[in-house]
Amino acid sequence: MNAYLTAGQIKSALANTPQITFEVTDACNLRCEYCAYGKLYSDYDNREDRMLPTETAKRFIDYIGALWASPDNHSVNNNLYVGFYGGEPLLNMPFIKEIVGYLKAGGHAKRFAYNMTTNAMLLDRHMDFLVEHDFSLLISLDGNAENDSYRVKADGKPSFEQVVKNVDMLRAAYPDYFAKKVNFNAVLHNRNSVDSIRGFIKERYGKTPRIGDINDSAIREDMKEEFKRMYRNSYESLLQNENYDEIEKEMFLSSPTYHSATIFLMQNSPFKYENYNELLFGKNEDIAFCPTGTCIPFSRKAFVTVNGKILPCERIGHQYSVGQVDSKGVMLDFEAIAEKYNNYYSRLEKQCRLCKNQRNCIQCMFNLDGLEKGKCDCNGFMDEKQYERYRQTQLAFFARHPEAYSEIMKNVIYK
């Protein structure tokens, strides 16, 4: 088996991770029909209305703080983003306040910036603290009342009116903060469209929302028909709109077409450099092949679940945890993590080497069905004909938007 990753790479990635995210609670005051922790899916721990103990988070902060003080840390004084996730994180506000205070008092050589994804149901109660500590807020809202009708309270009643009331209150009380620090996230489904979401949020709040598809991995067998009924593809929804050129430009990287073109450009342009060494001394063409587009663990973030499981990302099923935080401390075996990843890679290498799109791959292997069994087919696999169609689609995009090349190269930092 090839050695794709080493323990040292993973330890260094954690020491320099740009973000730590805590699942502060698995409780939620909504029952969204398509929730990634809801009835459609099978890859998460049981939801038991738990609250993440502050001591668990502090142990992890102390552990990673020791790495910041070690030779593995090459990012001293950089911003570290600390995220609060749920469930609905505002249900565990005492945790958030205590952890923010703990980080401030820790004396770490880091600048901390805070972010949160929230359904805004409790925003009116806690907005003063969030503004005081300059939180970046990503508010979940799927458009107007009809568009948003899958987002219901525990009693089945709509949440829309309460959410927009609270968001309006935040904007009225703190207009400058709202303009700079608040954004919106929407899920596309069969009750909305890219145009209707964008139109509502743009008109009401002057913002361009992020729009994503319903999660399509780890769907329960008995829920596949329900999933198909709700699912809508953002790329197709965009192209169906008569004003899609205008929408593309406005949404930029939030648009699926711009996003796809950016990935293609960053992987194929000879003028994109990973670092100054590449710029000054040339690119290393002998870098070992690594199957799939899966991130090196912790290179983008470290995620701690409400049960103390450690994962490289909140989008990965909880069965793939790589460590644990509990009353005994932090248990992370970097050698074991490297071995685990390398075993997965070895199962996928043959398929990946035959794929003509391997340079542009963004497929996370943890979203492939059958990974543990070693028998999984990648939905993103492309033979020569499929890749050529993909390539021509990206080139046609740049022909249609000649300004996009310079805009992407000037404004996008690709990691």
Image (cartoon, rainbow, N blue to C red):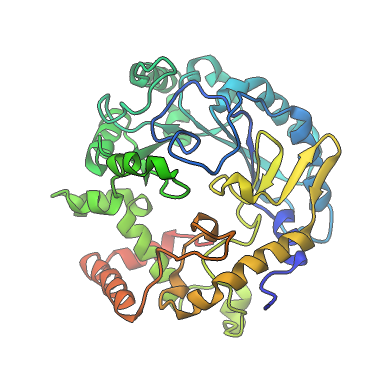
Query: Which residue corresponds to the image point at 31% horizontal and 63% vertical from the top-left?
Result: 404
Can residue 275 be spotted in the picture?
A: no
Outermost residue toward the front?
Answer: 222
Where is residue 243 shown, x and y percent of the image?
16, 49
Outermost residue toward the right?
Answer: 328
Outermost residue toward the left?
Answer: 242
Where is residue 186 shown, x and y percent of the image?
37, 38
Q: Quadrant of residue 366?
A: bottom right
- In the picture shown, does residue 53 fall above or below 41? above
Can residue 338 be spotted in the picture?
A: yes
Where is residue 259 shown, x and y percent of the image?
37, 58
- In the picture shown, does residue 29 fall above or below 55? above
> Quadrant location of the N terminus?
bottom right
Q: How many marks?
A: 0
> Quadrant location of the C terminus?
bottom right
Q: Would residue 298 appear left or right of 209 to someone viewing this image? A: right
Q: Would residue 173 appear left or right of 245 to someone viewing this image? A: right
Query: Which residue corresponds to the image point at 72% horizontal and 25% vertical from the top-left?
Result: 98
Where is residue 361 shown, x and y percent of the image?
46, 68
Front-most of residues 198 and 86: 86
Q: Quadrant of residue 76?
A: bottom right
Query: Which residue corresponds to the image point at 33% horizontal and 75% vertical from the top-left?
Result: 387
Front-most of residues 282 and 153: 153
